[in-house]
Amino acid sequence: MRSKSRNGLIVFIITLVVAALVVTLSFTAGDKIKATNDSNTGNPNGVSNYDYDDEPAASKKNYLAAVQLEGTIEGANATYNQKWLLSVISELKYDPNNLGIALYIDSPGGAVYQADEVYLALKDYKKTGKKIYVYMGPLAASGGYYISCAADKIYANRNTLTGSIGVIASHVLDFSELLYNIGIESTTIYSGDNKNLGAFDEEFTEEQQEIMQEICDECYEQFLDIVKEERKMTDDFARKLADGRVYTASQALKNGLIDAISDWDSMVKDLSYEVSGSPLCKVKTYKYEKKLTFMEQMMYTVSNLKPVKAEKQMSMPMYMYGK
C-alpha cells in the first residue's frame, strides 16, 4: 500500500515537471519585441479575408505593423508593458521597410503619464510621413481613446465602447473618525501640512481636495486639448462630449470621435492601399508576451489560471474608465 502511494507521488511530481517544461518552452519569448511574419492581416482574432501571396516582388520587403495594445496602460502588467510598446514604435520609426502602423486597442485606459508618452511617441513616428490607423476592440476608453487620437484614422467594431474622456486624480478613504470612535490612534511623523495627503487615518481637508482637483483639472484640459486638435472640434462641442461617459460605436461616429465602423481586415486593407497603392501589403504582428516566473507557469498549467492584471494605482492621475 505504501509502495502504491509512493509511486503515485512520483508520477504526480513527474507530471508537474513535464508540465513546467512545456510551459517554459511556450513562454521563452519573454518581455521583448516579438514580431511574426503573417501571411494575413495580423487580425487579433486570427481571421483574415485577404491573401497576401500575390504581392508584387518589388515590394516584398515593405510591410505594415499590426501592433496590439491590450490591458491597463501603466508601467507593466500581465498584458501591457510600456517599455516594450515604446521600443516597438521606435524600431518601426527607423525601419525604412515599415510603411505604417495598424494599432489594435482594447484598453480601459490607465495612467496619465504613460498614456501621454505613447501618444507623443506615435506623433513622433508620424513625422516620418508614415501613417497610423487605429482599430478599437471591445473597449478603447479614456487613456485608450487618448492614444487613439494620434491616429490618422480611427476605426471601431460596431460593438466597441469608447470615449470616457475624463480624469480620476485620486480615490481617498477617510477612516480617521471611525478609528477615533473605536479607540485606535494612528500617528505619522511628517513635515509639510499636505505631505500625508490622502492618508486613510487623517482627515481629508478642503485644502487637500482643492490640491487634487487642480491636478485633475490640468490633466483634463490636456486631454480635452488633444481631442479638440486631433478631431477638429470646437471647445464647446468637445466639452459637451467630454463628461466622462462612454459612447457606443454609432454614437462615437455621429459625434466625430471615430471615422468609421468596420472590421479589422477592412481597416488594414484601407491602410495598405493608402501607403502602398495596393490592398495586399505584407503585415507583421507585434504583441507583448509577459515572461512568466516558474511558479506562475506551474499555476497556469496545473490550475489553468490566467495571470491577474495589476491593480490600478489611484494615487496618480488616471485616464481610466470604471473602477
Image (tube, rainbow, N blue to C red):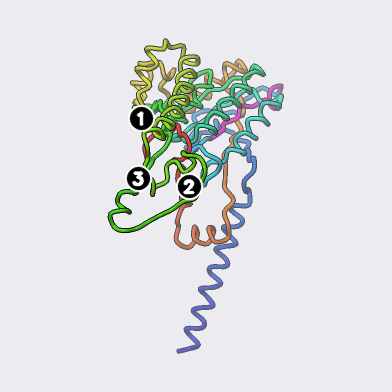
**Disc 1: CA contacts within 10 A as few (<14), some (14-19) or many (>=20):** some
Residue under label 1, please give it: 159
Residue under label 3, please give it: 174
Determine whether 313 is above or below 261 in the image: below
Which one is in front in this view, the residue at disc 2 or the one at disc 3?
3
Report how far apart the C-alphas of labels 1 and 3 lie in the structure.
39 Å
What SS does tag 3 mark?
A: loop
Determine whether 66 is above or below 190 in the image: above
Q: Nearer the viewer, residue 94 or 15?
A: 94
Mark 1 belongs to which amino acid?
A: Asn
Quadrant location of the N terminus? bottom left
**Disc 3: CA contacts within 10 A as few (<14), some (14-19) or many (>=20):** some
Report how far apart the C-alphas of labels 2 and 3 lie in the structure.
24 Å
Q: Residue at x 37, y 16 (%)?
A: 255
Mark 3 belongs to which amino acid?
A: Asp
Mark 2 belongs to which amino acid?
A: Ala
Q: Nearer the viewer, residue 39 or 13?
A: 13
Q: Position of residue 16 (x, y in %)?
A: 53, 68
Report how far apart the C-alphas of labels 1 and 2 lie in the structure.
26 Å
Q: Residue at x 48, y 85 (%)?
A: 4
The image quarter containing residue 258 is: top left
Q: Position of residue 163 (x, y in %)?
A: 39, 26
Magenta stretch bounds: 58-68
Q: Residue at x 43, y 25 (%)?
A: 217
Q: Is any part of residue 138 visible from this angle?
A: no
Q: Is any part of residue 204 visible from this angle?
A: yes
What SS does tag 2 mark?
A: loop
Residue under label 2, please give it: 310
Q: Residue at x 37, y 40 (%)?
A: 204
Q: Position of residue 96 (x, y in %)?
A: 71, 24
Residue extending furthest toward the bottom: 1
